Image (cartoon, grey):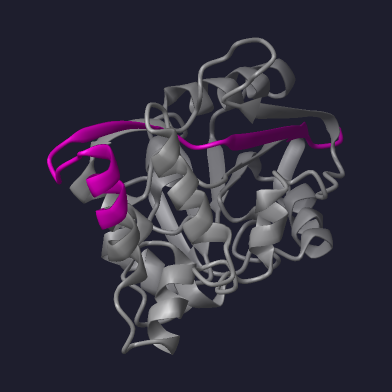
Amino acid sequence: MATFSSKTFNSALYQSFRPGYNTNFFKMVYNYHVKHNGHFDTAVDVGTGTGQVASVLAEKFNQVHGVDPSATMLSSAIQKPNIAYHVAKGEDLSVIPSASVDVLTVAQALHWLDHPNFFSEVKRVLKPHGTFAAVGYAFVTFNNHPRATKRILSLGNQPEELGTYWEYGRLILDNMYKSVEVPMQNVERHYFPDHPQGLPPIIAERIDMKHFRSYIKTWSSYKTYCERHPDRPDIVDQTIDAIMQEENLKDEDEVDLTWPTILIMGENDG
C-alpha cells in the first residue's frame, strides 16, 4: 500500500496510536488452530506494519516472521528475540520455506493484496492443516456519543472530506471482506461487535481524546489529503474540535470506542 510505504509516513505515530487486537482475537485464532493443527512452532504475520500482531504471536510461538513491503513501517517495529522481520510483499513470501508455518495472520492488510497470488503463497508456506487468519476493522464508533460517530463516518466517507483520498482497497474493507474468496477448508467468518453468539469485540479501547486525535491522523487518507492540500486548515483537527465542543469533551476526557471487525479463519488442505 503506497502511503504506508512512503519514506515520509510517520511509522512511529502509527505504532503509538493504532488500536491493538485484544486477547479475544488471539484466543479465537488459537482455539481454531488447536482443533485443526495444534502446533505452535512457527507463525508468519503478513503486512505486519510495526509488529502489533507479531509481537503477541511471539509470546506463543517459538519463531515469528513479520513480513511487510514497507521498510519505513518496519523501522518502528516491536523487537523481540524470536521475531525476524522481512521487507517483502505478501504475494511473494520466498523468504519463508514451503510447508513450514503453523499459523499465518494478516491484520488490516488483506484488502491491499492481490488475492490469487497471495493465497497461492499462503497455501504454499502453511503446513498441512495449518491456520490462516485475517482480521480487518472499519471506521471507529463511539459507544456513548452517537453524534461523534456520525462525524467520524462523515470524515472518512464524504467526498468533500477524506472520502476520495483512500486507495481502492478501502472499499474491500468497508464491505467487511465479503467479496474476498478464501480458498481453504473449514472457513469461518466472525463479525463484531454484533456477533450472533454474543462474543465480545476484538478491538475496543478506552482512550482520551488527545490520543483519539492522534489515532485519526494515522489514517492513510489524512496523509494524502495533507500532501495535496498543504495550505488548507487541518481537516482532522476541525472534526475533533467540533466533536469536543458538541460533546463537551476535553483532551484528557476518556471515551469508549469499538471498531466493527471481521475475523476470517481457514484451514490449509491436508
- At 29% from the left and 78% from the top, the residue drawn is 233
Find residue 91 and report its image quarter. Answer: bottom right
- At 40% from the left and 85% from the top, the residue drawn is 227
Relative depth, front residue between 47 and 178: 178
Q: x, y percentage for residue 34?
A: 64, 18
In the rendered image, the vertical position of residue 209 relative to residue 26, given as above or below: below
- At 85% from the left and 47% from the top, the residue drawn is 181
In the rendered image, the vertical position of residue 51 relative to residue 224, given as above or below: above
> Furthest residue to the top?
197
Quarter holding the C terminus is top right
Find residue 269 and report its image quarter. Answer: top right
| Boundaries of the magenta span | 241-270
In the rendered image, the vertical position of residue 75 relative to residue 110, given as above or below: below
- Magenta run includes residue 267: yes
Q: x, y percentage for residue 157?
A: 58, 59
Look at the image and tell me whether residue 130 can be seen: no
- Magenta run includes residue 32: no
